Image: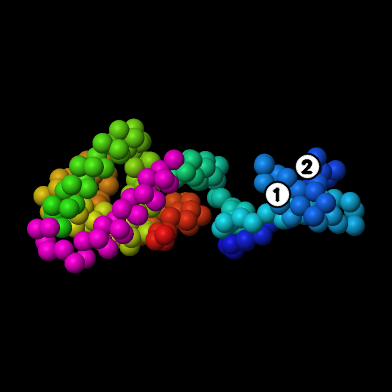
Amino acid sequence: MRNFKLLLIGIMCSPFLMAQDGTTRVNGEFMPFIIDECGDTLVLVNLDGVSVSSFREFESKEEYNRYRKYRRYAAKVYPYAVEAIKIFKELEIETQQMKKKQRRKYTKQLHKDLKDEFTDPLKKLTRTQGRILIKMIEKELDTPMYFLIKDLRNGITARKWKIAGSFLGYKLKKGYIPGEDPILDAVLNDMDISYSKG
């Protein structure tokens, strides 16, 4: 897999308006272009992090269908995973110098503030979507969800969620294990969920 910052788009008989300074207007923005020897217009577009991966081969139609389903679900929960990772990382930074009591108070208030925003959308997720969301977070933070909950809230809350998860066949203490579900690994490896401050 490689990241590309520049993409050449070949356009036959370009319908775009050409400016005299070597730029063309695409979606309201002026972008540089070149015209090759065949007369095709190539618009140069600067993209942020485009991933290109080889075509995947699957052993069965069921495996392919599961991959497609996981991709759809991962795309749905992706914004929540990114936001959760951002919150975990920023909370870690914010509370580094705080005493235990101050940290608990701070995280309790943060939980209260975020509850209204995220409770309804997260309740609407399917079991598989929730599992994928948890795996995304665990993979990026390299910590099982049980310990994240315990660290942020308390041991009683973590145990409560561990018991609730076990009824759904999920072990919160287990965490993300590469290779356990190769289809899920392929989907998660295609998604950039890393946190960068700024």
* Residue 58 drawn in magenta: no
The x, y position of residue 111, in whole percent, is: 21, 45
Q: Earlier in the sequence, mark 2 or mark 1?
A: 2
Residue span colored magenta: 76-102
> Which image quadrant for residue 169?
top left
How is the structure coloured here?
rainbow
Q: Nearer the viewer, residue 167 or 31?
A: 31
Quadrant where the N terminus sits is bottom right
The kind of residue on which mark 1 rests is: Phe
Q: Nearer the viewer, residue 138 or 177?
A: 138
Taking the spot 26% from the left edge, 36% from the top edge, the residue there is 116
Q: Which residue is mark 2?
A: 16
Q: Which residue is mark 1?
A: 30
Label 1, secondary structure: give it.
strand
> Which image quadrant for residue 64?
top right
Q: Nearer the viewer, residue 99 or 78?
A: 99
Q: Residues within 10 Å of mark 1 (few under 14, many from 20)?
A: some
Q: Nearer the viewer, mark 2 or mark 1?
A: 1
The kind of residue on which mark 2 rests is: Phe
Q: Residues within 10 Å of mark 2 (few under 14, many from 20)?
A: few
Q: Nearer the viewer, residue 46 or 30?
A: 30
Taking the spot 18% from the left edge, 47% from the top edge, the residue there is 109
- Which SS does the magenta portion mostly show? helix
Note whether residue 59 is visible.
yes
User: As drawn, is 49 to the left or to the right of 92?
Assistant: right
The x, y position of residue 175, in whole percent, is: 30, 57
Quadrant where the C terminus sits is bottom left
* Residue 94 drawn in magenta: yes
The x, y position of residue 145, in whole percent, is: 26, 54
Label 2, secondary structure: give it.
loop
Separation (CA) of disc 2 from disc 1: 10 Å
